[in-house]
Image: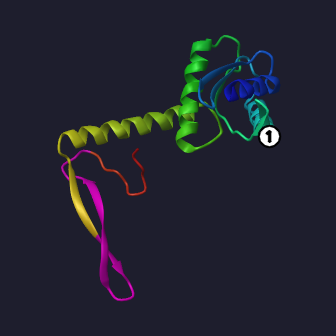
Amino acid sequence: SLNKTIAELLQTNMPSESQIHANGNLQFDVLLANFGSEIKVNLLAAKLQRAFEQMLNVENLSVLATPYIGCAYALKPDVQSEDLLAGARLALESALNTQQSFLVYSDALKAQLSEQNELENKVLETFSNDGLTLFLQPVVNLKDAKCVGAELLLRVAEQSKFSIYPGLIVE
């Protein structure tokens, strides 16, 4: 019932030519065919975020809910809806992973997801080939110079053909 209420609120705030697909609990794909410009998409995103700042009435209960929305749009009418849906689903997946309530599919997002996928595949391959080495790094109390614990690290072995920088997170 909550998903239905959210879908109805989305529909009332969306242009008539848009399509909304429920993709799970509080998860929606929004398709905007022949939608004009990125500026219009950003304005729509702001409008939707404002719409969900209010309490929703669901079965005589007041509920505050923030759905996750993956959006894909096309500037021209010749884009297939299946392509838009695939883009919206990628945007939704990324929105869920990064805890963003509204995310629009773009070529930059596609490249970022592709790079992350490639990195994850390299890590899995390295792991299956015993290319990771286990290290214990001491944690030292600077006041008395005593070891108070240790961090467990997995490092890519030197003979591997790639490296992972410390600031990079592999999920």
The quarter of the displayed image where residue 71 is located: top right
Image position of 128 (left or right of 145): left
Q: Residue, x 73% and y 17% (percent of image)?
A: 34
**Furthest residue toward front:** 60
For the record, the magenta segment spans 138-161
The quarter of the displayed image where residue 28 is located: top right
Q: Residue, x 74% and y 31% (percent of image)?
A: 41
Measuring from the top left, give residue 78's x and y in whole percent: 66, 10
Measuring from the top left, give residue 94's x and y in whole percent: 54, 36
Image position of 135 (left or right of 166): left
Q: Amino acid at mark 1?
A: Met
Q: Is residue 171 visible to the viewer in this orientation of the structure? A: yes
**Which residue is the site of mark 1?**
55
* Label tally: 1
Q: Is residue 107 visible to the viewer in this orientation of the structure? A: no
The magenta stretch spans residue 89 = no
Measuring from the top left, give residue 5's x and y in whole percent: 74, 27
- For the N terminus, which image quadrant? top right
Q: Nearer the viewer, residue 165 or 91?
A: 91
The majority secondary structure of the magenta stretch comes to: strand
- For the C terminus, which image quadrant? top left
Q: Secondary structure at mark 1?
A: loop
